[in-house]
Image (cartoon, helix red, strand yellow):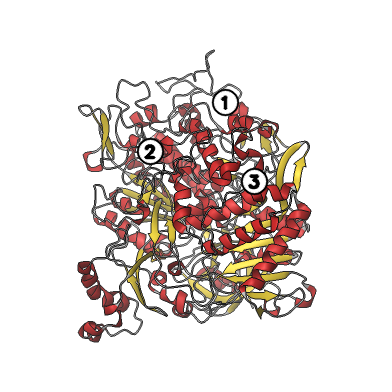
Amino acid sequence: MTNHWNDLQYADALMVIGANPAENHPISFRWISKAIEKGGKLISVDPRYTRTSQMANMYAQLRSGTDIAFIGGMINYALENNQYHNEYVANYTNASWIVEDSYSFEDGMFSGYDEKTRTYDKKKWAFKADAEGNTLKDPTLQHPNCVFQLMKKHYSRYDADTVCGVTGTDKKMYIEICKTFGATGQTGKAGTILYAMGGTQHTVGTQNIRAYAILQLILGNIGIAGGGVNALRGESNVQGSTDFGLLYHNVPGYMDVPTTAEGDLTYEGFLTRITPKAGYKINHPKFFTSMLKSFYGDNATKDNEFGYHYMPKIQAGKNYSFMRIFDAMYRKEIEGMILYGSNPVVGGPNSFKEQAAMGNLKWMVAIDLFETETSTFWQREAGADPASIQTEVIFLPACGSFEKEGTVTNSGRWMQYRWQAIKPKGESRADLEITHMLARRLQELYKNESSPAAKQMQALYWNYGEHDHPDIDLVSRDINGYDWKTKKQVKSFGDLKDDGSTTAGCWIYTGFYPENDNLSKRRDNKDTGMSNFLNWSFAWPANRRVLYNRASADLNGKAWSKERVGIEWDGLKGQWVGNDVPDFVKDKGPQDPTFADPFIMQVGGKGYLFSSGLNEGPFPEHYEPYENPMSNSFSSVQFNPAVQFGEKEMNAKGESDKYPIVATTYRLSEHWQSGVMTRNVPWLAELVNNMFIEISEELAKEKGIKEKDKVVVSTARGEIEAYAMITKRFKPYKLKDKTVHHIGMPWHFGYKGIATGATANRLTPHIGDANSTIPEYKAFLCDVRRA
Amino acid sequence: MEMNVTRRQFLKLSGAVAATLAIVELGFDDKSAKAKSGEFKIATLKPTPTICPYCSVGCGILVYANENDVVYTEGDPDHPINEGTLCSKGTTVRQVYTSEKRITKPMYRAPGSSKWEEVDWDFAFEKVVKNIKETRDKSFIHQEGGVTVNRTDAIAYLGGAALDNEECHLNHKLFRAGLGLSYIEHQARI
Ligand code: SF4
């Protein structure tokens, strides 16, 4: 989230698209309700009429996988009807920047495409610069090749008729929504966009989110209270686990991992690659070096490039993401798998195939509170023949969240402490302890060896106590970072150095433990202004509650609205003051030429309406999902041209003649993710104890299905059986030249636990987004019949 | 720093207790609860603040536990986001502890076997580190095309979204910086 939960109350309009907070983030709805009480308009955009839709002022039915069409049309409407925030767009975004003539867009394709590799040459989308390298600009926004005009042209194709023919939305309602949300473009108004996995789990997922961001930038909604682009994260610490680099392509703090690319041969070359020429990320060398120092301690010295070569280098250009792990497992390239609270047999796409691939493992370690479908993939209940599966499985019992202590980071980036209320149940242990014990034992085993593999483990600086129970305070201090010599805590990431004199396990958190107080433990709930609660816990970065808050003030540093003061320039004091920690240099005043550059992380300090960062183009463009019921109305390019395919055997594809119905998955209030922590909880298991398929009255009638009948849903991947739940919440979609049915189902079920049921992900395709490789769980084709 | 739930807050809580439960209709008698509140089992227990382990709203919860059991849990009235309220999941968090389905001993499944065996931690750890070391040593790539790469592609790591930050940090440190895994992924990808 750019903003945070309590901040939602300040919105004049809230568009929820690809999320369902009333059911999946129920308590967040208190703040949405508060906004509504104050006259805010709630807009719900969803394939299904959810409980969020029920609470909304406006509801738009949207066929799964058509967000870019929907938002593209809203961008078009705002530009055509002058709803956009002119001053913000001209000054705080890159609207005025001029793009090279090599950029073009024609019939769904941007310039620079290579069909063989399915990639673009992004250099074709560069900005025009003068001889000194300064970007050329046209402040009047009239130049035909300036970002503003290119954007206008691009989205002029997204007229309401074409959009609604693709999304299946009622046109009158669509225009009403465009008007209402577009009205937040007025100076002083705020609109927020809330999204979740309904936005990201598509082959165009990242571009969906970029489309939301572009809309918010042109309406001047980023950086202000009640605004922002807000990801409603699904798990209590999925924010933190991402911050801490538990993805193949990142180390902590969103820095790249070293690769085999030629430039990465030396630490200096690597730093040159990951450090942009301008923007706050010019400090990457300080953050990376401090991280290496935290990893390797005394074994990270200037002479050995701070231990850079101990870090694994992945193959340049190779994708090691979730689905590719199972591809590799299928090819028998992976021998062992370690799972910490992870259950891919229920949660992974095309999960029956993923489960089958696990049979190729030599060993598996599963760490969890309960038996999972994954840790028992070899059992008869799983449909397996145990005798034929040679995988050795070790299950380590983990304890629950209040049987240990530590922090989690919520969607609003608040890092909150959880104290220990009771000792771990039975012989279970904290994951922290399990990892610590593993590290100690492995270091012991490697102690007297001299292989390169041993040296890497020996180099690791593991200083969390000489006992099997780790000292968590030492871990916290390590995350924050300290001066290597004096061991004094570093106060902010501004103090980190690139010479090996400081450490920082995760630089974006530096400052949460500045001296002897761990600020994530703070419990002062006094509202310090605009519900930012600056003394409650700690928010990364630097305890900042609303990101990009410089943009909450106008060109002179005055708040756009007195009702929404983020930070303001105080000429007398010579500094930024207000209700939040400035996301800006504290004493940078009007005399500074970059005073009006609010997006400090970006090169040039502006919000990027046009960006060459993503793989399929500088503007989001609608392509149909991998499995789709109609041809693309916006171009002759049916499918995202930058999506990469994985192992063919893992990825069967269905066509609409055989599978005419659109399907999506969703979550329920009473269950959570793959169900391990809810289907094993008696009350929750009782509240929702069966798997079901939600279908419309119209489809039920067509197929002769009655409420609670057993139905079979089939896709190119397989079939599942579950109870039919017939509702008015799904309606047939009237698209351009046909009507299609749409169904939905929860994905929480599996064969273990108290409440059991068929696993929805046996049906979902094994294909992912062109940038993030998130699987396309949310839009696929199926057929339905009575069992 | 001490966590501080003051006596005042604590008293304020006893009133909120009944309301929370009544909402979810779990068979709690609101009136008699209030009448007996002076004798509540939790009256002698000190609440421990925690954060809900389910979704990312990050609601505050108070846990009342004695040495051997979690007696009661409820929404933390001092928490600025939930102000004492909880959804169905947060409300039932006590059962994450009490559920009979909890696994409390390490378990081992031998290759080809059709059942688990309960084992002790030493046995389990020995198996785990032996497997990691054997696979890693066999598959470790020191150099590739003249570049020092120090990695293994034969072990996959999954998980983290339900772990604490401190755990994520140590896991990243051990599995990437120490063991050289390339396949490190978790729920954020899916
Ligand atoms: S109580 Fe409900 S809304 Fe609050 S964090 Fe837990 S799951 Fe989310």
Tell if the residue under mark 1 belongs to the same chain as the one under mark 3. yes
Give amino acid for label 2.
Answer: Tyr
Disc 3 + disc 2, Cβ < 8 Å: no
Q: Amino acid at mark 1?
A: Ala
- For discs 3 and 2, the disc positioned in front in the rendered view: 2
Distance between the alpha carbons at the discs numbered 1 and 2: 24 Å
- Residue A271, placed above or below residue A539: above
Q: Which residue is mark 2?
A: A548
Q: Nearer the viewer, residue A718 or A629?
A: A718
Q: In the image, is B145 to the left or to the right of A546? A: right
Asked whether, in this view, residue B58 is left or right of residue B168, the answer is left
Q: Which numbered disc, 1 or 2, marks the residue that appears first in the sequence?
A: 1
A664 w.r.t. A695: above or below? above
The residue singled out by tag 1 in the image is: A126
- In three-dimensional space, the C-alpha distance between marks 3 and 2, rounded to whole angstroms, equals 34 Å
Residue A639 image label: 3
The image shows residue A712 at horizontal and vertical percentages of 63, 73
User: x, y (%) of residue B57?
Assistant: 39, 59
User: In the image, which is nearer the foreground, mark 1 or mark 2?
Assistant: 2
Q: Is residue A67 visible?
A: yes
Residue A605 spot, x, y in % from top left: 43, 29
Please identify the quadrant where the C terminus of chain A is shown. bottom right
